[in-house]
Amino acid sequence: MKRLISLAVLAIALLAVTFARPALAAGDAASGAKVFSANCAACHAGGNNVVMTEKTLKKEALAKFGMNSAEAIITQVTNGKNAMPSFKGRLSDQQIQDVAAYVLSQSEKGW
């Protein structure tokens, strides 16, 4: 009986973690468009990249460089990397999630 209860608790915990995580990363693409326009478009207008031209926000480039998930984009925007500045402290966590949703949405549409 203890084993059955332990398995049930484990299954519930796994389901909670599995389904709760995407909800945390979910963002509002419409709000993200506004944040992107005000903070990102100078370097990434139209999904391009004026600093590192091969690292665009286009679907193929995001996949090639491992940036085709909300989590990867959130990490990049939050912490920065190479020529990309950190937006931690400049944008809220929700704004960063919204930008990630917008970038992924636009990459699917082909910018």
Image (cartoon, grey):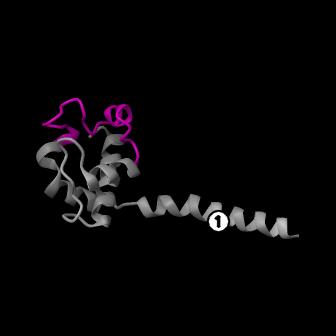
Of residues 75 and 98, the one nearer the viewer is 75
Give the farthest residue toward the left: 42
As drawn, 88 above or below 100: below
**First to last magenta residue range:** 45-69
* In this rendering, position of residue 54 left or right of residue 73: left
Give the farthest residue toward the right: 1
Q: Main secondary structure of the magenta part?
A: loop
Q: Identify which residue is drawn at 22% across, 40% down.
A: 47
Quadrant of the image containing the C terminus: top left
x and y, in percent, of residue 18 in the image: 58, 58
What amino acid type should be assigned to the residue bearing mark 1?
Ala
x and y, in percent, of residue 46 in the image: 19, 41
* In this rendering, position of residue 10 left or right of residue 102: right
Rate crowding at label 1 as few (under 14), some (14 to 19) or many (20 or more) other CA atoms within 10 Å: few
Q: Identify which residue is drawn at 35% across, 54% down.
A: 101
- Label count reads 1
Q: Identify which residue is drawn at 27% across, 40% down.
A: 57
As drawn, 109 above or below 8: above
As drawn, 90 above or below 73: below
Q: Identify which residue is drawn at 48% across, 58% down.
A: 22
x and y, in percent, of residue 56 in the image: 24, 36
Quadrant of the image containing the N terminus: bottom right
Of residues 90 and 63, the one nearer the viewer is 90
x and y, in percent, of residue 7 in the image: 77, 63
**Residue under numbered circle 1:** 13
Q: Quadrant of residue 25?
A: bottom left
Of residues 2 and 103, the one nearer the viewer is 2
Q: Is residue 47 magenta?
A: yes
Q: Secondary structure at mark 1?
A: helix
* In this rendering, position of residue 57 left or right of residue 10: left
